[in-house]
Image: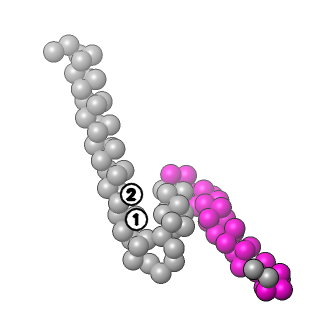
Amino acid sequence: MSPQLGSLQIKREQLKHLESAEEKAYADLVALCQFLPVPASSQVGIGIGLAKAGLPSALAAWFAFTMPSALAQIAEPCDGGAV
């Protein structure tokens, strides 16, 4: 086997391992979020943001997932009860 072919095989195995590790981490995150009392979709987004890019990304994900529903809940009583 040539050195190039050997290094390509090692790289392929490392990428396969990394992908499976990320899939397992995602599955663990979803399982944890299903257990907690807040909507899981928001928590998963925040968890991914935190894992990938740190606290600023987690805060951005929180804002993106939470703010629209918070604004809707604040605006609902202000519309006079109209449906």
Determine contact: label 1, label 2, CB under 8 Å.
yes
**Magenta stretch encompasses residue 71:** yes
Residue 29 pos. (x, y %): 40, 64
Q: Which residue is mark 1?
A: 30
Residue 26, labelled with which disc? 2
Identify the image quadrant of the C terminus: bottom right
Image coords of residue 21 (percent x, y): 31, 50
Q: What kind of residue is marked 1?
A: Val
Magenta span: 52-81
* Location of residue 55 in the rendering, given as x and y in whole percent from the top left corner: 59, 60
Kindly indicate the quadrant of the structure image that contains residue 16: top left
Q: Nearer the viewer, residue 83 or 58?
A: 83
Which SS does the magenta portion mostly show? Answer: helix
Which sits in the foreground, 9 or 37? Answer: 37
At horizontal 69% and vertical 69% (from top left) the residue drawn is 67
Residue sitting farthest toward the left: 1
Residue 70: image location, x then y, percent: 69, 75
Q: State how many labels appear.
A: 2
Side of 61 relative to 47 (left or right): right
Q: Residue at x 28, y 31 (%)?
A: 12
> Mark 2 is on which residue type?
Tyr
Q: Is residue 40 left or right of residue 2?
A: right
Q: Is residue 15 left or right of residue 9?
A: right
Question: SS for tag 2?
Answer: helix
Left or right: 35 as drawn, with respect to 53: left
Q: Which residue sits at x=49%, y=57%?
A: 48
The CA distance from mark 1 to mark 2 is 6 Å
Q: Residues within 10 Å of mark 2 (few under 14, many from 20)?
A: some
Q: Does the magenta segment cover residue 45? A: no
